[in-house]
Amino acid sequence: MAEKKPGLLGRLFGSSSRPAPDQESPPRAIPRQVNSATSKSAWPKTTTVFSLGILSKIGEHKAKYRYDDLAATFFSNIYAPGLQLDLRATGEIYADGSLIGTYTNEKILKMVRDFNNRGDPVQARLYRMNEDATGLIYVVFYKIPNYTEERLCKVSGTGSEAKQDELLGYSVGDELYLEEDEDHDDRVNVADIGYLSKKDAEWALDELNMNDCEVTVASIDLNDSGKYVLTVRIRY
């Protein structure tokens, strides 16, 4: 069996060659390779943001800035989307300790230098690889948030049996998130478990940066009606 060259897609398969009439040996498989350069299924090589494995939090550090379009040039097009990368402030790109490419974006170069000097984490993953060995990188910069205030809010819409069962899976300190409800005007959802009261929603929409706050479970209490009530702590 011929050795499969690195980076080529497809599998080796054989065709039988007929032996001469006086031969008793079995037919030999003749391997053939599929050239990935001409294979339509090989390109484009890309992935979704959700499958990259980017963390939203590293210890006390939380994702502060996200960029999904950092252009880069690689020395080969064999690298698969999702590959973890190490961006250097010199413009070099490493993977598993090996230099595999470069980038030149001045803004990102400065940010990588500044974050490295402060000891703040930077994560990067290959987002797209092109056939000509250019590509896009998804890079995230992390900072320890400097929250100065907090607000406790009760969560509505958790009275159904399904939601009550779901609440039992939460613990104090579990992290949630806020997002504006696209189907209901002036409503702010709390993850997929419920939504803020009208008063708290008005405050969140008018005064809160929902992408730069921390939302955690403050308590889950049983009310007089025998229902569990979720209260969240919003730090901002």
Image (tube, rainbow, N blue to C red):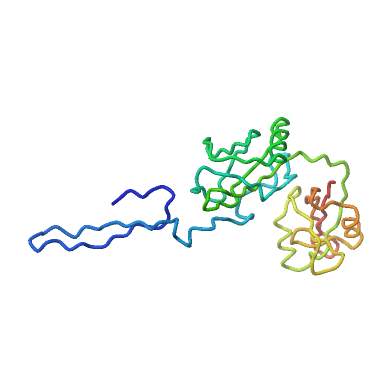
Q: Position of residue 48 (x, y in %)?
A: 61, 57
Q: Position of residue 53 (x, y in %)?
A: 61, 49
Vertical relation: 90 (above or below) 20:
above
Looking at this view, name the residue that lies furthest to the front. Answer: 132
Residue at image x 66%, y 34%? 89
Q: Position of residue 134 (x, y in %)?
A: 57, 48
Q: Is residue 179 left or right of residue 169?
A: right
Q: How many marks?
A: 0
Vertical relation: 103 (above or below) 16:
above
Looking at this view, name the residue that lies furthest to the top. Answer: 117
Q: Is residue 34 left or right of residue 145?
A: left
Vertical relation: 118 (above or below) 191:
above
Q: Position of residue 15 (x, y in %)?
A: 26, 62
Task: Give 207 or 157, whichever is nearer the viewer.
Answer: 207
Task: Give 222 or 209, whichever is nearer the viewer.
Answer: 209
Q: Quadrant of residue 21?
A: bottom left
Q: Is residue 214 left or right of residue 66?
A: right
Q: Is residue 164 left or right of residue 129?
A: right
Residue at image x 63%, y 36%? 91
Q: Quadrant of residue 87?
A: top right
